[in-house]
Amino acid sequence: MMDLPENPAVRRALGLGPALIVVTLFMLVPVIVMALYSLLEANPFGGVYWRFSSDAYFQFLFDRDLMDNVIFNPSYLVIVVRSLLLAAITTGLCLIAGFPIAYFIVRCPPAQRNLWIYLITIPFWTNQLVRTFAWIIILGRNGTIELPFRWLGVLGPDQTFGLMYSDFAIAVGLTYAFVPIMVLPIYASLEKLDFRLVEASADLYSSTYETFRRVVIPLTKPGIVAGSILVFIPSIGAFIQPDLLGGGKKLMLGSLVQFQFATARNWPFGAAVAMILLTFVMLCLVWYAQAARCSGSQQGVGVHG
């Protein structure tokens, strides 16, 4: 058996080397290629001309009229606002649904918890495209929701609730897709919670609401924040739900990127939108890391104090 080098730096390099190679090849290199393509000139027939151009980023906020004057174009900002709003709504709905589920699981006997976690992860075994198509059957015209109202005569032959191809349908699809991702980190935090503190709060005549707000929420905050970020970030870049449930009429940033590469064939603009989305995601992660570091420092000061 080969002995490892005694030099700590060499041992560290050998240990981290394979992971760094994988991250570089499959994460860093694609990002560099995407950034490079965003700074090239678009070929009208697809692909790029290998000439430097910032038109892709210029196109995100501005346009030119018939007199070649630069004008502000808010069209893509509307997509950004819609993406952020739907991602925030999805995160809130996932939190409202996911926290009680995680709390219920953690209060079950230990022998049953694995079964419930197993049931929570079952949707991941099915392709997301298939799961989204199921919501078309549920929300669509003469679907599962509308059909009973037609039988009762509440809806006429030409009437519909208009649930499909709307922001509501997109939010429902995103919430269904990402609820399990919210449940798991919250469950991990609740599992570490000492429920004797909850009992002590009740013994001190604290109401259920006060116990939940002052004891449970602060102690499970890391799981809540982690779950919210894990839901919020992929919700912004989602494109399956906006395409199928929004009918292509309610674009989000992810569907805009997919449209630019697959249909419009404007690769530089698609790459520029992807880089803008990536920058926003990185800022969110940096903010989370900074907030976690500050929270840990404050807790350390409190303990030592």
Image (cartoon, helix red, strand yellow):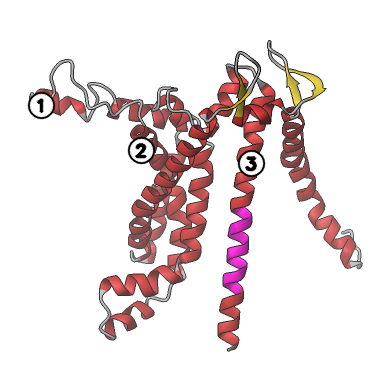
Which x, y percent locates residue 88?
44, 47
Which residue is at a point 52% across and 50% down the rendered structure image?
230
SS at mark 2 in the image: helix
User: Could you say which is closer to the camera, residue 293 or residue 182?
Assistant: 293
Q: Amino acid at mark 1?
A: Val
**106 in relation to 176, above or below:** below
Sequence order check, earlier mark of 1 and 3: 1
Count numbered badges in the picture.
Answer: 3
Is residue 5 in the magenta section?
no
Q: Is residue 79 left or right of residue 53?
A: left
The structure residue drawn at horizontal position 85% and vertical position 56%, both measured from the top left corner, is 14
Residue 172 disc label: 2
110 shown above or below 194: above
Reading the image, the residue beneath label 1 is 154
Q: Say if the magenta span includes residue 289.
A: yes
Q: Residues within 10 Å of mark 3 (few under 14, many from 20)?
A: some
Query: Can residue 238 be seen here?
Result: no
The residue that appears at 53% across and 45% down in the rendered structure is 233
Q: Look at label 3 and name its amino acid.
A: Leu
Q: Earlier in the sequence, mark 1 or mark 2?
A: 1
Q: Is residue 20 visible?
A: yes
Determine which residue is flagged by label 3.
278
Q: Residue furthest bottom?
A: 305
Q: CA distance from mark 3 to mark 2?
A: 24 Å
Please state the extent of the stretch shown in magenta in the rendering.
Answer: 285-296
Q: Residue at x 34, y 51 (%)?
A: 97
Amino acid on which disc 2 is placed: Val
Contact check, label 1 and label 2, Cβ < 8 Å = no
Give x and y (percent) for residue 170. Answer: 39, 34
